Image (spheres, grey):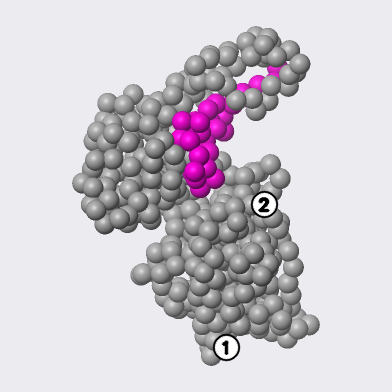
Amino acid sequence: MKYIVILGDGMSDYPVDELNSRTPLQVAKKPNMDFIAKKGVSGMLKTIQDGFEPGSDVANLSVLGYDVRKCHTGRAPIEAANMGINLSNDEVAFRCNFFTEECGILKDYCAGHITSGEGKILIDLLNKKFSDELKAINGKFYAGVSYRNIFVCKVKDAKSKNFVCQPPHNIVGAEIEKNLITVKNDNKDNKDNKSNKDNKSNKDNKDKEINLNSHPSDISNAGLEIAKKLNHLMLKSWEILEKSEINRKREREGKNKANMIWFWGQGKKPKMEEFKAKYNLKGAIISAVDLIKGIGKLAGMDVIEVKGATGLWDTNYDGKAMACIKALDDHDFVYVHVEATDEAGHLGDINLKILSIENLDKMAGKILQEIKNKGIEAKIAILPDHATPIKVKTHTTDLVPFAIYSTKSKDEK
């Protein structure tokens, strides 16, 4: 028996007024998903464990059966793993987005989906121009895919979880300076904390955010100083990026500029049980994004690259389908991830999300047909990792729908 998971990132949604109170998933023409649901079993799944943000890192780990309370430290170190960045114990990785700033507002969290080639040039520029600042914190920028990059620095005396960093896709349209990195206090017992003197009724100071200009004794000065330096890098990046040749060209072409950077999703090197040891199945992952591929690498799965896989709506759906079928020759489990549905949700683009769902369905149909042609016995699950509703343009903690179909007879499912 073979096992296939087809995952549409952010595919589920809320009813949309323009669709007569139906969701994009309801409106989309999806005969293959309908077949899987009709012939198989379906239900609702909780992918975001209590106390965790509804990120794709948490959700995909949950879909794969991992307890995020034990293995999750943050999004960025997972992406770093795929990029071959080997973190030391005192290093913290941050996701570093390029974004578009306009009049002090975060206008576009993805800088118009800047190309990876353009992004690499800008990352090299930041490493050069920030050389002195980076030496002070042993920091370095690493170019990733499109707007998604990684920044690594040493944080010896502070916990990465104490940095409060806002995901940029959650604050589109907000003032940048009101959403910079802060530090939170997770020590409940320190009686010398000056903030407690100002608010004696607050007996439990857990998760209290600390003003970066103060120095409470239960937060290391190192943590505060790192946060200040990271905020400095983000704000000063505008001076370097705004007038770069890349952004002058993008402006001439009417594209959103990548004129600032944003740090978030931080964490230290995680420890994960290998997929093979966990399930006694040899697994493979097919995706265009570093996060999902990083999960695969940390879990000891084979990461299969597909030419033309972009992480957007123009990805190579047929290539992913055929890569899945080929992988079944020597793998027991294949995880096929499609990012396009999530990106369309973040953009709030109804038609693009419907189109992305329909393209994903065609990919699923090709996989179903090839399995039938080759006589492969398989169980196929199709689902989102989380919802990215058009109305809110960000991730939510809602339960997600799933459907599972077996090629074997009904009583053997």
Please tell me which residue is depicted at 49% across the width and 57% down the height of the picture: 347
Disc 1 on helix, strand or loop? helix
How many marks can you see?
A: 2
Q: Which residues are magenta?
A: 161-189
Report the amino acid beneath label 1: Lys
The quadrant in which the C terminus is found is: bottom right
Residue 252 position, x and y percent, is 24, 53
Instruction: Name the one closer to the observer, 111 or 318.
Output: 111
Q: In the figure, is residue 139 to the left or right of 162?
A: left
Name the N-terminal-most of marks 2 and 1.
1
Report the amino acid beneath label 2: Thr
Instruction: Name the one closer to the observer, 261 or 323.
Output: 261
On the image, numbered disc 2 is attached to which residue?
Answer: 397
On the image, numbered disc 1 is attached to which residue?
Answer: 372
Please tell me which residue is depicted at 48% across the width and 53% down the height of the picture: 291
Instruction: Name the one closer to the observer, 187 or 197.
Output: 197
